[in-house]
Amino acid sequence: MNLKAVILAAGEGRRCRPLTQTRSKVMLPVGNRPFMEHVIRALAANGVKDLIVVVGYQKERVMDHFEDGIDFGVQITYIEQSELLGTAHALRRAEPYLKDEFLVVNGDNLVDARAIKELISAKGDNVILAALRPHTGDYGVLKVEEQRVTAIIEKPGRPCAGILNTGAYKFSPAIFEELSRTPISLRGSYELTQTISQMINEGNEIICQTSKGIWSDAIFAWDLLNANSLALGMNDSKVRGEVEDGAKIRGPVQIGEGSIIRSGSYLVGPVSIGKDCDIGPNATILPSTSVGDSTRIASHSEIRNSIIMSGVRIGSGTIISDSVVGESCTLGDHLVIESGASAVEVEEAFYRADFGAILADDVAAGSRVLVSPGTIVGTGVRIGSGTTIRGSIERDSRVI
């Protein structure tokens, strides 16, 4: 049987703003690849190569990157969800393409081949891939008796350990009849978890398959750092660029074609450097850091546990810790991003977080800028030299 998979990739990822002001969450890079590329590779590694991708928000960026899927060893059919009316509504759009058992996965999660293999091999017509987590307050939690799901508790909100719903499923085509009867939620959408709860209430068997593989999500922009660390841990060393005499590399480090690591630089893996980058001289890149294509990091700068996207220019003597820097940013000399605990406001609610800064695309900062922990900077912001910034800075603002 040719097992197919539906990848849900229509949403924006509002709580990952401002990074999702210019791309959907599925295109946020972790381990120097978009979330959805990790998903596709995990499916392909298990022989699942016929994919139906439901797109919506910023669909052109998704389709331009993956095209027909041939470069990733798969065949992709795109379906548009023109109105973002929830996961159940998105899956119904794929019904004409599915006549046999199939998988459903979120395009904005990090998942490895082992987790997909466990989902495929699980027995039962309706299977939920689950993960054990010490903190599940922002996810759906499963109540399970003898591997059978008896209830889904949506986002309990309080800190608690439990069996988390990863949002990856295996279904028979009978699910579509259930989807057609899914009631609209209080948020005005049709959610797959509501469909499953309805099936449980009617006595249908829903199997819980707890995964021992890698699975990670990013609810908020700073959660990308943990997913990035996990993704980098899946990589082996691969040096395709040039490493000058006097540069030192320790641990698993990937360096793309056309990149140069100049003398005196020190890289400690896991680290991934993209194509056509220019690093150093005397730059330091420390573990759990990914650097996108065509990025320049000048002398005596230090980057640790961070995501630096493509086309970024970083001046000399700059220190960046526990941060995400969007595409085409320009950061001046001796800029410092401090890291630490902070309270961050997202959609009129405050959350405790521990990170440096989130800089959206096309941010330009002068020299000697100090960035306080928990700072979030919108797309196109301009920051003058010698300034100290903190909190949230709105899109296209000027700070002098």
Image (tube, rainbow, N blue to C red):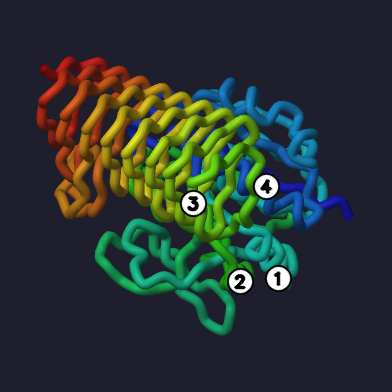
Identity of the residue furthest to the front in this view: 245
Callout 1 amino acid: Ala
Q: From this view, report whether residue 287 is shown above or below residue 359.
A: below
Gap in angstroms between the C-alphas marked 2 and 1: 7 Å
| Mark number displayed over residue 122 | 1
Between disc 3 and disc 1, the foreground one is 3
- Mark earlier in primary sequence (2, 1): 1
- Secondary element at image label 3: strand
Gap in angstroms between the C-alphas marked 2 and 3: 44 Å
Residue at image location 72% in from the left, 47% down from the top: 5
Q: Are marks 2 and 4 in contact (CB under 8 Å)?
A: no
- Secondary element at image label 1: loop
User: Percent from the top left, x then y, of residue 250?
Assistant: 50, 58
Callout 4 amino acid: Phe
Gap in angstroms between the C-alphas marked 4 and 1: 20 Å
- Sort mark 4 into few (<14), some (14-19) or many (20+) by Cα contacts within 10 Å: some
User: Percent from the top left, x then y, of residue 179?
Assistant: 60, 47
Q: Are marks 3 and 1 in contact (CB under 8 Å)?
A: no
- Sort mark 1 into few (<14), some (14-19) or many (20+) by Cα contacts within 10 Å: some
Between residues 136 and 171, which one lies in front from this camera angle? 136
Callout 2 amino acid: Gln
* Residue that numbered label 3 is attached to: 248
Gap in angstroms between the C-alphas marked 2 and 4: 21 Å
| Mark number displayed over residue 209 | 2
Identity of the residue furthest to the bottom in this view: 146
Image quarter of the N terminus: bottom right
Q: Are marks 2 and 1 in contact (CB under 8 Å)?
A: yes
Between residues 18 and 76, which one lies in front from this camera angle? 18
- Mark earlier in primary sequence (2, 3): 2
- Mark earlier in primary sequence (2, 4): 4
Between residues 190 and 59, which one lies in front from this camera angle? 59
Gap in angstroms between the C-alphas marked 3 and 4: 56 Å
